[in-house]
Image: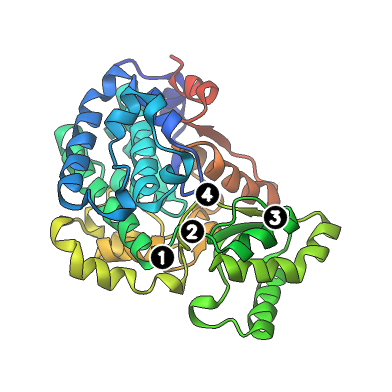
């Protein structure tokens, strides 16, 4: 296997990589379809379809999966794939995004970046929201058949993570009055998560607190800042009716300041106390069919928490920590990626998608600090070509 020029230069310089993976809200099926055409990924997709087949045999009749979870059929016949609304359902999109980003990583290891070279020249890994699961998988440093076996375990686990997230929020419908209110405001596709761009963290925290107190929004009706993405970009998770109340309170101010209010393409309010029931439900109903024997001590490189930035190599119960990070705890992206600017050895970032959303979020933090780092996204054909050039 010929070593790409970028990797050779990196090794000669003694510099290191930071690897990262994206999260919810990115389109993934078209990207997965391109990866499906890669001959080097035949064994990867074979394992993928085998795992999904076992899941279907057990839970395929559940109402959440009324159009199946048959990615093989959808990839073989793209015109027959379900609607975007169905593909956005957590039990579909969570594994779908995971498959896509791990396929991007796997392809890189097949085209010049051996696992030993890639992991050996990496100083840290993390992933935005559900991307931290892929980060943990890659951080184990597995190769060959061991990688495929471990990938199968992780794919099974992440399906049941998304499945239990949807169990906590089983209603896909939006009340008519909420739809009407959003239409009046000019906001499209209301959902239980919304991106707010423009406020600082302190400003948004103040407005969320005021809205909750003024309107008596408590318990599952409350608004929560669930993801702190960049210094001026955050996400609120809540019932769509509560998000509409927030929007009505602050729309005039946001319009005046040209701030953005954009619903995410997702079907559950991730990263907030609304999801507190998910881990007990998973342990009771699905953990028995989700083998996961991996611990933090198995990680070969630092994998950083998206909640508080700690190195997961210290984790004894890696499964439950990952589960809580993705569904229940808020995300602080600056804490997950801080080693990029604190570790002088890290010279470049490789993002494995899907799409370029997480790459841009990291770029937002670097720009705010006037820091320049090389950044490549495997989802971007031009940037992938640059990585693979020999």
Q: Is 75 drawn above or below residue 242 in the view shown? A: above
Residue furthest toward the right?
A: 256
Q: Name the residue tied to disc 2.
A: 173
Q: Name the residue tied to disc 4.
A: 265
Q: Name the residue tied to disc 1.
A: 169
Looking at the rendered structure, the secondary structure element under dot 1 is: loop
Q: CA distance from mark 2 to mark 4?
A: 14 Å
Q: CA distance from mark 1 to mark 2?
A: 11 Å
> From the viewer's perspective, is the residue at label 2 or at label 4 nearer?
2
> From the viewer's perspective, is the residue at label 3 or at label 1 nearer?
3
Crowding around mark 4 (Cα neighbors within 10 Å: few <14, some 14 to 19, many 20+) is many
Identify which residue is drawn at 26% across, 54% down: 62
First in sequence: mark 3 vs mark 1: 1
First in sequence: mark 2 vs mark 3: 2
Considering depth in this image, is 350 or 238 the residue closer to the camera?
A: 238
Identify which residue is drawn at 42% across, 42% down: 87
Considering depth in this image, is 354 or 250 the residue closer to the camera?
A: 250
Q: Name the residue tied to disc 3.
A: 183
Looking at the rendered structure, the secondary structure element under dot 3 is: helix
Crowding around mark 2 (Cα neighbors within 10 Å: few <14, some 14 to 19, many 20+) is few
CB within 8 Å, label 1 to label 2: no
Looking at the rendered structure, the secondary structure element under dot 2 is: loop
Q: CA distance from mark 1 to mark 4?
A: 15 Å
- Residue 21: x, y in percent? 43, 44
- Residue 244: x, y in percent? 65, 66
The answer to whether residue 229 shows anywhere in this view is no
CB within 8 Å, label 2 to label 4: no
First in sequence: mark 1 vs mark 4: 1
- Residue 143: x, y in percent? 21, 35
CB within 8 Å, label 1 to label 4: no
Q: Quick one: quadrant of the C terminus?
A: top left
Q: CA distance from mark 3 to mark 1?
A: 23 Å
């Amino acid at each position: 296997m010929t070593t790409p020029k970028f990797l050779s230069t990196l090794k000669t310089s003694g510099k290191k990589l930071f690897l990262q993976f994206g999260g919810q809200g990115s389109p993934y099926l078209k990207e997965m379809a391109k990866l499906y055409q890669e001959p080097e990924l035949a064994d990867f997709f074979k394992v993928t379809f085998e795992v999904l087949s076992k899941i279907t045999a057990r839970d395929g009749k559940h109402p959440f999966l009324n159009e199946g979870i048959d990615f093989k059929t959808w990839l073989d016949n793209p015109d027959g794939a379900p609607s975007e609304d169905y593909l956005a359902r957590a039990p579909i999109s969570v594994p779908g995004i995971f498959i896509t980003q791990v396929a991007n990583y796997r392809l890189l290891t097949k085209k010049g970046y051996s696992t030993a070279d890639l992991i050996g020249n990496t100083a840290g890994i993390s992933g935005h929201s559900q991307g931290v699961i892929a980060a943990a998988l890659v951080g184990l440093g597995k190769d060959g058949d061991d990688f495929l076996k471990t990938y199968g375990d992780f794919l099974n686990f992440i399906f049941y993570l998304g499945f239990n997230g949807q169990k906590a929020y089983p209603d896909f419908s939006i009340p008519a009055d909420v739809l009407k209110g959003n239409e009046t405001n000019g906001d499209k596709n209301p959902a239980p998560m919304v991106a707010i761009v423009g406020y600082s963290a302190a400003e948004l925290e103040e407005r969320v607190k005021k809205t909750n107190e003024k309107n008596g929004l408590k318990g599952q009706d409350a608004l929560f800042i669930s993801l702190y993405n960049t210094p001026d970009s955050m996400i609120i998770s809540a019932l769509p009716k509560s998000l509409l109340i927030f929007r009505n309170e602050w729309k005039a101010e946001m319009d005046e300041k040209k701030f953005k209010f954009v619903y995410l393409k997702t079907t559950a309010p991730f990263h907030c106390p609304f999801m507190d029931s998910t881990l007990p439900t998973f342990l009771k109903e699905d953990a028995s069919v989700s083998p996961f024997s991996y611990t933090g001590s198995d990680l070969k490189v630092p994998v950083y928490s998206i909640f508080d930035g700690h190195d997961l190599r210290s984790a004894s119960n890696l499964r439950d920590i990952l589960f809580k990070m993705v569904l229940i705890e808020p995300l602080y992206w600056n804490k997950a990626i801080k080693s990029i600017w604190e570790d002088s050895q890290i010279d470049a970032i490789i993002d494995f998608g899907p799409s370029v959303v997480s790459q841009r979020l990291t770029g937002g933090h670097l720009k705010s600090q006037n820091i320049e780092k090389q950044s490549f996204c495997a989802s971007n054909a031009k940037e992938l070509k640059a990585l693979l050039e020999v």
